[in-house]
Image (spheres, helix red, strand yellow):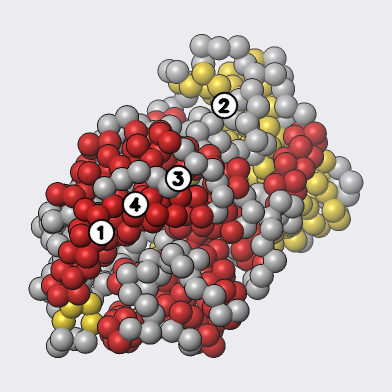
Amino acid sequence: MRRQIEDYALLSDLQTAALVHRRGSIDWCCFPRFDSDACFTALLGHREHGRWLVAPDGPGEPTRRYRGGSLVLETEWDTPEGRIRVVDAMPPRGEAPTIVRVVEGLAGRVTVRSELVTRFGYGRILPALRRVDDASVATAGPEAIGLRTPAPTVVDNTALVSTVEVSPGQRVPFTLTWFPSHTPRPAPVEPTEALRRTEAFWRDWSSKSSYTGPYRDAVLESLVVLKGLTYSPTGGIVAAPTTSLPEWLGGERNWDYRYCWLRDATLTLLALLNAGYVEEAGHWREWLLRAVAGDPDNIQIMYGVAGERRLPEWVIDWLPGFEESRPVRVGNAAADQAQLDVYGEVTDAMYQSRTHNLGASLAAWEFGRHVLGLLEDRWREPDEGIWEVRGKRLHFTHSKVMAWVAFDRGIRLCEEFGRDGPVDRWRAIRSEIHAQVCREGWSDQLGSFTQSYGSSRLDASLLLLPQVGFLPPEDPRIRGTLEAVQGQLSHEGFLLRYRSEEGTDGLPGGEGTFLPCSFWLVDALALDGRHEEATELFERLLGIRNDVGLLAEEYDPSEKRLLGNFPQAFSHVALVNSALTLARTAAGQVHPRAPV
């Protein structure tokens, strides 16, 4: 059976995550952090690369859902013998990372099989299996995993297998705990209490949402995903919990997204702040400032969850990849790229924090002044741009616009919040960038701004120009760009980033439509007063979420399947902000990111 990315659901303990297939197999999990080596890697290979299956031992059809406002997953199975429910959760981190799976009998007598295949080191390292007191323990080098269950458990060809019959009202728990092999095994987790505590945590967190606008359920589901992708010790939010899920099946656009991108800073802040999650927004801003403050002269586009700078990229040559899509990569060489837009994102995040009453920080402003000082010269340089091209550096229009945003927000922080800075010089640079973009980034022939200076290519990032306040939505140049982008980059109703076959990014062509860009089109249409068209596209985007409300990075409308790393924070951030844009524009208000 061909796997689909949308077959998976997310579990998270706010430090790492697991992906559960609809047929009961946990095929991806990294312990103890999002970016640690995986011990279940079947997502990028096969059963022998590690997985944990809990399912009926025979035919059955599953249906699943998250318990309201949580990442506690319920899967109900109808089988010829009866019906069961499997409840899966990762309790917020206590002594050690734990996965709890509880099987509940609902009708008849159903035989349930648990098959635990542990392979450390991304599917390569076979552990030693032994029984220790009440646990079955898998150990290899520095890592160990302990399985506790009352179900009879045997070793079957390097797997731990448990089989048990479940009757109505009967509950059979399984708990899996990771720990360093040189330390004592953590104390047992009581499964029923762990589920209660996990559900209570999520119920309390979800109740704090202040968003009452349209599509509230979809917005809350996306906010829960963002919380699930948050590394709670630092506040960093990973782009996705996975690596190397392909942007095109069989292609090589397979990247590691288990890191934190500065580019996501402003939009993530807005999504959290406008939904009432001020504490989470504050933690994200603090992570951002810690990550970049150590060496402001060399700002990276991404960092590790604790602010690590070194993210060396290498290929796992023993894994075949998802649906044979190679290579499988760990680390991300784009961390060393030059991307001017991050200066704008960081400065805009500082500005948006103040306008949303997040609190002032003198240290943050001192850093901001330093960043703008660097940008006074660097804005003139070419870069790899928002899409992290692995080809020639260019003068990307979006990058220049975000340099304009950096100076604009620096000026506004001085004018509106009393910060001290060389405002007259910054105004002159802001005007120079604006004039250059309007001259060099514009094509009379296309009637549109272009991807880079002197180019005839289009780029969906151009839709952000009115959202950041570079030009008003009603400006003829913005409307011309919207018409051109929508006309040339639309594919079966969704939007491409750009035409990858044109070779701009230094990689072979072929990728799906890009979901954040499709949400940007929703925003652009709404700002242009085309509310009905924007709403129709937004609802179509909601319709491609999987059965538990999750989105990947991209979508193939021809095959009707999700593509890319999953679930993708940027897609869910864009969903939240587009819902807010629809609500605001319907009320005659400006885009939440554009300064008044």
Q: Which mark is residue 427?
A: 1
Residue at 71% from the left image edge and 51% from the top image edge: 208
Q: Is residue 8 visible?
A: no
Give the label, 1 or 2, closer to the camera: 1
Q: Earlier in the sequence, mark 4 or mark 1?
A: 4
- Quarter-of-image position of residue 123: top left
Q: Earlier in the sequence, mark 1 or mark 2?
A: 2
Residue 70 drawn above or below residue 588: above
Circles 1, 2 touching at the beta carbon (< 8 Å): no
Residue 511: % across, % down: 30, 67
- Quarter-of-image position of residue 481: bottom left
Q: Which mark is residue 238?
A: 3
Does 289 sit left or right of 344 as displayed? right
Does 48 sit left or right of 420 as displayed? right
Marks 1/2: CA–CA distance: 55 Å
Please give the residue where the numbered disc 2 appears in the rendered image: 178
Q: Earlier in the sequence, mark 4 or mark 2?
A: 2
Element class at badge 1: helix
Marks 4/1: CA–CA distance: 10 Å
Circles 4, 1 touching at the beta carbon (< 8 Å): no
